[in-house]
Image (tube, rainbow, N blue to C red):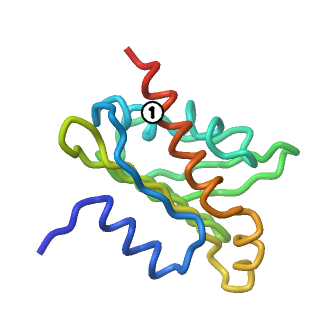
Amino acid sequence: MSVDAVTRLRLMAAGLHTTLYAEEHLDLPYEKVWAVASDLAGELPHFVPLLREFRVPPGDADRKRALAVGPLGSRSAFDVRLAPGWCLMQSRFVVGGMAAVPEGDGTRFAVLGAARPAALRPIQRAYAFGVRRRRAFIRKVAGRAALRP
């Protein structure tokens, strides 16, 4: 039995016990939503407040090594798995993901953020700030997707 990308991300969020998971239906075409979500270097810094830059090497490979740069210049290497409707980014301390599937006339979109070591979960809970921060990420993706031609 095969599950779609959003269901897979939801299951991953449950397994990671993350506090930062949200999904919702967007009244935007899948192609526009995924064009924004998959543009990691160009768009991700607009969605993640603690990210100044996300450097991803060019090319069509679905597995890449990326570099996250924080606002004060801190750096963290990420393994990235990027495929249509699916993005998983993992560093030593953080797991992030996005998923999208066509749903009716729009798109079901989901986002996940989790601390990898269990010891960091209290920090994760403090940073997540509940539903507001989770939904803000999705609203930003939707807003930028709506601007796409």
Residue at 66%, 46% in the rendered image: 48
Q: Residue furthest left?
A: 1
Q: Residue furthest bottom?
A: 118
Q: Position of residue 17 (x, y in %)?
A: 54, 80
Q: Residue furthest right?
A: 72
In the visual, does 133 lie left or right of 40? right
Residue at 57%, 46% in the rendered image: 137
Occupied quadrant, residue 45:
top right
In this orientation, which residue lies closer to the viewer: 67 or 95?
A: 95
In this orientation, which residue lies closer to the viewer: 79 or 4?
A: 4
Residue at 37%, 53% in the rendered image: 99
* Quarter occupied by the C terminus: top left
Residue 83 visible somewhere in the drawing:
no
Residue at 73%, 45% in the rendered image: 49
Vertical relation: 30 (above or below) 149: below
* Quarter occupied by the N terminus: bottom left
In the visual, does 8 lie left or right of 15? left
Q: Position of residue 89 (x, y in %)?
A: 52, 58
Q: Which residue is mark 1?
A: 36
Q: Position of residue 28 (x, y in %)?
A: 33, 32
Occupied quadrant, residue 60:
top left
Query: Which residue type carries mark 1?
Result: Val
Q: Secondary structure at mark 1?
A: helix
Occupied quadrant, residue 96:
bottom right
Vertical relation: 34 (above or below) 145: below
Residue 125 visible somewhere in the drawing:
yes
